[in-house]
Amino acid sequence: MRVEHHARRKTKISVDEAPLSELQLKVVEAAALAHLDSGLTIASHTIGGKAALEQLDILQKNGVQPAAFIWIHAQSEKDTVYHAQAARMGAWVEFDGLNANYLTPETVRQHLDFLIFMKNEKLLHRTLLSQDAGWYEPGKPDGGKFAPFTYLFEGFLPKLREEGFSRNDIRRLLRENPAPAFSVRVRGRAGG
């Protein structure tokens, strides 16, 4: 498989809940080959923790280190054991969906609790945060209700500070972690 190098910083895939189908297994294997060829990070839209761990197993069997993998939508898995396990393996665990159009007090609290858990487990260095904003909904007038790209900074970060997150913690989540997570470099068995 040959991968063209573009300005993109990731290869995005998607899987359903575990166990993965035969087709999904092939997609993950293809992502492993693409990573080993291009150094692009593998970002996977993944709903459950079992599916995230299954993907990590496949990647490792194909010579890709977990550090090349981002578990997108990790907040959809409510059992933090999976978050901790993936992070301890070296994967990136991304809590996103901080879209102002869809947030409720319960989902905000859940995101806070997940981040508090990761901090308490000393896993903040393997954690990413995203808002998933700006949705365009085809078929709706004007593309639907636009979610501004401001909630993370204007609404969520003040809540993190209230929960005791330091400036360094926030800098880690928003600046320090994304740099290595999205770096273009092969992270294989013998490589970085």
Image: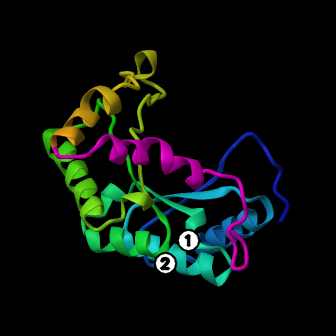
Residue at 81% across / 48% down in the picture?
Answer: 5
Measure the alpha-carbon separation of dots 1 and 2. 12 Å
The residue singled out by tag 2 in the image is: 54
Q: Is residue 140 left or right of residue 25?
A: left
- Tell me the amino acid under the disc marked 2: Glu
Q: Is residue 1 left or right of residue 125?
A: right
**Taking the image as drawn, is residue 77 in sight?**
yes
Q: Position of residue 95 (x, y in %)?
A: 36, 51
Residue at 52% across / 48% down in the picture?
Answer: 178
Q: Position of residue 63 (x, y in %)?
A: 69, 79
Q: Position of residue 8 (x, y in %)?
A: 69, 43
Q: Earlier in the sequence, mark 1 or mark 2?
A: 2
- Report if residue 189 lies within the magenta region: yes
Q: Position of residue 42 (x, y in %)?
A: 61, 59
The secondary structure type at the circle numbered 1 is: helix
Q: Quadrant of the C terminus?
A: bottom right
Tell me where the magenta segment starts and ends, as one range: 163-192
Residue at 83% across / 65% down in the picture?
Answer: 1
The residue singled out by tag 1 in the image is: 66
